[in-house]
Amino acid sequence: GAVVSQHPSRVICKSGTSVKIECRSLDFQATTMFWYRQFPKQSLMLMATSNEGSKATYEQGVEKDKFLINHASLTLSTLTVTSAHPEDSSFYICSAPERTSGNTIYFGEGSWLTVV
Amino acid sequence: KQEVTQIPAALSVPEGENLVLNCSFTDSAIYNLQWFRQDPGKGLTSLLLIQSSQREQTSGRLNASLDKSSGRSTLYIAASQPGDSATYLCAVNSNSGYALNFGKGTSLLVTP
């Protein structure tokens, strides 16, 4: 089946720095990718929809200048958390619909971000 | 906006019991519904996907049903085992190619 790979799986960064998370579709092209965030004991909340070749669409309440999304190719979307703060510590996970399978959605492995 | 609710939030059962997890959604116009498992500190494992035209799907000891008109789905786990302990998430896809709307999950503990 289709595979979505996410990297890094875990990252620790200092407050004020930026960290980039990559999401790759390994065996299919993804014009759209979705980024979710999950706080402890909470559900996964959609942050933004990444669109290849155009600007991302952010959900209400998500700061687009803080969470930079780039979808420069059909197989790669990146999420950059800028000027990270401890409250940004969370589980971030991406997903992508695979068109030939009726848009079955495949998830990456997720990334645990800890800001210290 | 689609709202997904899961009941109960947490459940503890002794090994061997059959159990049912519930999921409800507010907008019955869905494309499909999916059940996931999430272990602590881990990502998502897809368990079952039910298309809107289907009533149920089965995989091993798991059976998921869908009643679209009433906005409900259930995940039935037969003969539960300690290894089934995890959080189970219900997610609704409102349209092909759209993002999933997740419930808050049911945290299941199966005790030996």
Image (cartoon, coloured by chain):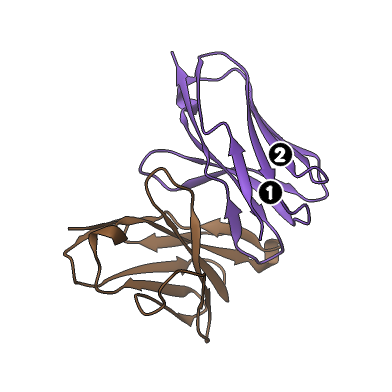
Chain colours: A brown, B purple
In the rendered image, the vertical position of residue A45 relative to residue B21, given as above or below: below
In the rendered image, the vertical position of residue A55 relative to residue B8, given as above or below: below
Residue A96 place in picture, x, y as percent? 55, 65
Q: Nearer the viewer, residue A71 or A74?
A: A71
In the rendered image, the vertical position of residue A65 relative to residue A37, given as above or below: below
Q: Which mark is residue B73?
A: 2
Q: Does residue B95 appear to the left or right of A55 in the view shown? A: right
Residue B47 appears in which quarter of the rendering? top right
In the rendered image, the vertical position of residue A55 relative to residue B16, given as above or below: below
Q: Pick the quarter of the image with the C terminus of chain B.
A: top left
Instruction: Identify the residue at horizontal 34%, vertical 55% (top origin).
Output: A90
Q: Secondary structure at mark 2?
A: strand
Q: Mark 2–mark 1 contact, CB under 8 Å? A: yes
Q: Residues within 10 Å of mark 2 (few under 14, many from 20)?
A: many
Q: Does residue A50 appear to the left or right of A100 in the view shown? A: left
- Asked if one can make out residue A68 in the rendered structure from this viewpoint, the answer is yes
Residue A30 place in picture, x, y as percent? 56, 72
Q: Amino acid at mark 2?
A: Ser
**Residue that badge 1 annotates:** B33
Give the chain letter at badge 2: B
Give the chain letter at badge 1: B
Q: Secondary structure at mark 1?
A: strand
Residue B22 place in picture, x, y as percent? 65, 34
Residue B40 place in picture, x, y as percent? 38, 39
Measured in 3D between alpha carbons, the distance from the residue under mark 2 to the one under mark 1, in whole angstroms, is 8 Å
